[in-house]
Image: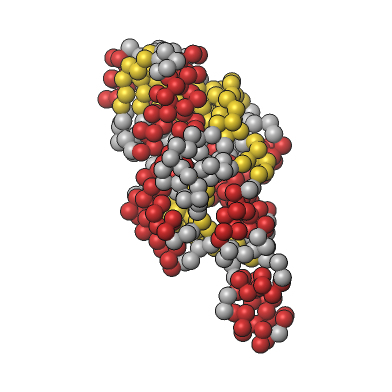
Amino acid sequence: MQDATRRRFLVGGAVTVGAALGPRVLRASAQAAPLKIGLVLPYTGVYAVLGESITLAMELVFARENWTVAGRKIEMIKEDDEMKPPVGIRKTEKLIDSDKVDILTGPVHSGILLGMRDKVHASKTILIVSNAGADDISRSKCSRWIFRASFSNWQPNQPMGAWVAKNVAKDVFIAAPNYAAGKEQLGAFKETFVPAGGKLIGEDYPKLGETDYAPYLTKIKQSGAKAVYAFFSGSDAVNFVKQFDEFGLKGSVKLTGAGFLTEPDVLPAQGKAALGVITGHFYTPLLDNPTNQKFVKDFQAKFGGKMPDGFACQGYDTAEIIVRAVKAVNGNTQDKDKLVDAIAHQEFDSPRGRFRFDAKTHNVIQPFIYVREVKEATGGLNNVVIDRIANVADPGTGCTLPA
Ligand code: BEZ
């Protein structure tokens, strides 16, 4: 790209003024057009720890780039969605209409993602989803402007149904919070659990943010289930896993679930109550690839020994995609077709393995879904890989890109 063209999109109207003032001033003003990245994440509430992990990992990548990409200073505009869809939608509108962000990321909550979707699509804002798994975003509600660097709710759970039926138990009770992600994650589990000979002994959907699981644990105890498969995350995961143990269920009922149940964001608070829990996820900080080893080392060095989790891996990948794609278009975020194309073609070594998007859906293809068991490892509790399933892509039913 010609230098003059590049400067024009970077500074917009400032080009005219810059041209009158001379090349040195022009270069200085060109640098003043920041790359604005809007974050819609929970910094309060049940999923606050998730929002924090995503943000810290993004900061780690941007700090590595000295907070500059293709000559543009990186500016993160963080908005707390408070885990409330109306708040998340309002913050999205503010970031798009007032802040005029170049790229949007977040959210954590599937309901917020579904609520943001039409605004993002209609305004042609590029959104790189850094957590929320709402399946429809890779299916009937897919959009050429939306990419997902995390997972669809289906991905970590669908392979686990058959695995649990074969390796853990046939009589299983399932539980998750009562909202889109809870229903979708357990639905994906059932998809392979029942055909593999599994029998659903019962299912329950406590409210998101429940603090007392006693009534649900009583039902599980009385059901005669041999195992439980659960999706809970953030403070819900802490409370469920601890109360499951306190209730005396651990001795007789095997606890299994989606990886979010025992991620390193909650493991220290769960303590030994989490020992032996088996979950499926695309990541564990124990993966022995060089990118992950460096990521874990750098993350721990920068953030006081904190262990990165899957959410941090998602933040890392989101930031890595932004840096690589913005470099590929020489900083030109105005030509959105080119930027979308650059994002779609990113492929790199991520802490989770080789990162690539599915061209059919713009959703990440998981190199592996790891079956992990919480054990004492590397001086504390961690998720140790005991099995793995390769190349897990969302079916993408109903998605026809470009949409
Ligand atoms: C979701 O709402 O999509 C979600 C939240 C926490 C962990 C995983 C998924």
Q: Is residue 329 left or right of residue 253?
A: right
Residue at position x 44%, y 56% in the image: 120
Quick check: 248 above or below 41? above
Quick check: 4 above or below 351? below
Residue at position x 40%, y 20% in the image: 228
Residue 391 x %, y %: 59, 31
Q: Nearer the viewer, residue 325 or 239?
A: 325
The quarter in which the N terminus is drawn is bottom right
Residue 325 x %, y %: 63, 54
Residue projecting furthest to the bottom: 20
Quick check: 395 above or below 174? below
Residue 170 x %, y %: 41, 12
Residue at position x 69%, y 37% in the image: 293
Residue 284 x %, y %: 58, 32
Quick check: 129 above or below 167? below
The quadrant where residue 87 appears: bottom left
The quadrant where residue 327 appears: bottom right
How many marks on residues? Answer: 0
Does residue 364 show up?
A: yes
Q: How is the image coloured?
A: secondary structure
Q: Is residue 104 left or right of residue 214?
A: right
Does residue 269 show up?
A: no
Residue at position x 28%, y 14% in the image: 222
